Image: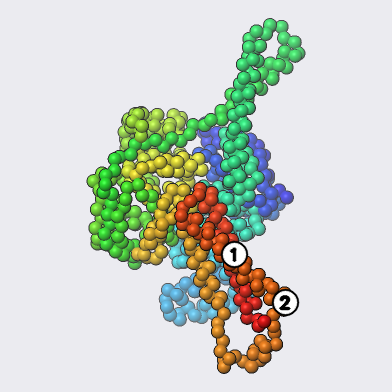
Amino acid sequence: MNLLSVENLSKSYGEKELFSNLTFGLLQGEKVALIARNGTGKSTLLKILSGTDTADSGTVVYRKDIKISFLDQNPVFIEELSIIESVLQADNEITRAIKQYENCLQKLAEAQADDFAQDLESATAQMDKLDAWAYEVRVKQVFDKLGLVKINQPIKNLSGGQKKRVALAKVLLEEPDLLILDEPTNHLDVDMIEWLEEYLENRDLTLLLVTHDRYFLDRVCHKIIELDNQKLFHYQGNYSYFLEKKSEREFNAARETDKAQNLMRKELDWIRRMPKARGTKSKSRIDAFYDLKEKATVKHQENKLELNVKMSRIGGKVIEMKKVYKSYHDLIVLKGFDYTFKTGERIGIIGKNGIGKSTFLNIITGKEQADSGKINVGETIVFGYYSQDGLQLKEDKRVIELIKENIAEVITLGDGSKLGASQFLTLFQFPPEMQYTYISKLSGGEKRRLFLLTVLVKNPNFLILDEPTNDLDLLTLQTLEEFLLHFKGCLLIVSHDRYFMDKLVDHLFVFEAPGVIKDFPGNYHDWRVQQEIKEHEQRKKQKEPKIIFKADTPDKDLERGKNKKKSFKEKFEFEQLQKEIASLEAEKTDLNKKMAEGVGQHQDFKDWSKRISALIQLIDEKEMRWLELSEIPD
């Protein structure tokens, strides 16, 4: 059943046409991703579908009485409202009761007194009356998973990332029929992203989203719509399938163009030699020629982003950190941190939001001072720092003015060649017609690409990237990854993009707790597998049967145990389980060994990790059954 139908949708901003005559539909229960380059109208299209923007022409038709929720890339709130008031804006008895109950709990916790006990008793009675507890549990679960703790805090006191999480909580709790999400993983830590993946995967809803997170796409979405050259292409599969079929489509389209060009040369020769008197057959052939000409002149090869910059020479000494301490208000960031960076190291940083990752980067670059300890930076080190806070481009400047004023009129590339500012911008996918655009008119992804340009052009040899993947399109991400794979200097990355981290880093700094940083030898996927093994071992210990002494055992239980014995079928199952568990454990050990040795390609690691996760669950289930049978006497 069609939940949404779009016909001949077109939208332009001034002279720039974003898309033209788009036609598609969404079936109930479909989970669809929209993929396109930055600046081609992804966010605008989502706003039109959600009703917060209008198209120039075309129609959007919804099934009757459906509920739509939309997560904007830059959500807007009434700043004076609290978090709980902003999330539960629907004005009905249940939401009013939950807001009253949560407010009482918060006030009681903050006051640490019995002043609000009577109010809480009244709020609890109202919750009982309306049977609102199930919904209240969901509210608490979503708040907890998204790190929204102080629910009475006003929206105006929140950071941009916190506001995005509030907006995400709001749309998830609205329980819509159609959920539209614009970059939902931005500003979430990895634990939050993995929870959101599972949440969306298991919910019975229709989903349309834009995201750059490739693991998220692979797990959640089963259909992809690509907006390319103002046309839509449909792929019935996940992101891996999309990559394969897109490559086939582009190859076949290029072949068709080549054939059309060869045929057009012959037809063009005929047109030139054709006598002026034209019969019906001639007119038909002329019409076919113009159709052929349109096919032959289709442009398939787009200008690709070229990250070709010079790297400053790096000496023997990089950075030494000795007994470094740092506290920020009540948060301990570093507690005697020791580390000596080596040439060519590629380190990823992971940890929960607010644990001090960005502060750590600021200390390394000298933007913030440590409380104590020594930080010795080598004389040849040139930092390139792509920070979340550094994205403060002057909105009233044109793109080319920013480059000329802040960088140079002439830029030297990695191969020694020199380019003017305009030529350099063209390499970074800012063609001449965009170079005189005001920065305020650029999309979020285009602004980030411009900021990346200003960082890389300084020829750094120690590159620090703090959440570089936010708002970048997939093509730009792939090009950035390719550049970083061949980057010879030191690389330090903070990112919630697991695919990006897995591809680029050799080891991790894991912020396990305030002030506690562990150096883990492997990428994110390796670390996640290790965590799953630890969690499995912990669950296994918890499930071990307690030894009950006869003196403590009731007589009735003893009699029951004496009377019950294993059946023949249970004996056979018990013996088979022992063999199966041993076989599964051996397979898991072998896969862990392969991952530790670092053999195999990236896809191998991905497949092995999935298999290890499945093995852990399977072993868990079989051990539980083995324990049940082991308690039954033979």
Name which of mark 2 and mark 1 comes first in the sequence.
Answer: 2
Q: Which of the two residues, 30 or 580, is positioned nearer the viewer here?
A: 580
Image height check: is 129 above or below 318? below
Foreground of the two, 280 or 349: 349
Dot 2 falls on a residue whose secondary structure is helix
Extreme residue toward the right, this view: 280
In the visual, does 236 lie left or right of 380?
Answer: right
User: In screen coordinates, is 375 left or right of 391?
Assistant: left
Indicate the position of residue 157 as horizontal and vertical percent values. 41, 60
Residue at 66 percent across and 51 percent down: it is 30
Task: Please rate how many residues cluster around mark 2, counting C-alpha atoms within 10 Å: few if below 14, some from 14 to 19, many from 20.
Answer: few
Q: Quadrant of the C terminus?
A: bottom right
Residue at the image point whose x is 59% and y is 64% from the top: 583
Q: Position of residue 24 (x, y in %)?
A: 66, 42
Task: Give the x, y percent position of residue 500.
Answer: 47, 49
Query: Which residue type carries mark 2?
Result: Phe
Q: Camera-side residue: 423 or 413?
A: 413
The alpha-carbon separation of the residues under discs 2 and 1 comes to 23 Å
Q: Nearer the viewer, residue 400 or 124?
A: 400
Callout 2 touching callout 1 (CB < 8 Å): no
- The numbered dot on residue 160 is none
Picture layout, residue 401 above or below residue 315? above
Q: Amino acid at mark 1?
A: Ser
Q: How many marks?
A: 2
* Image spot of residue 193 (x, y percent): 51, 57
Mark 2 highlights which residue? 568
Asked if residue 509 shows in the view, the reply is yes
Q: Secondary structure at mark 1?
A: helix
Q: Which residue is mark 1?
A: 583
| Mark 1 neighbour density, 10 Å: few (under 14) some (14–19) many (20 or more) | few
Residue at 61%, 50% (x, y): give it.
221
Residue 56 showing in the rendered view: no
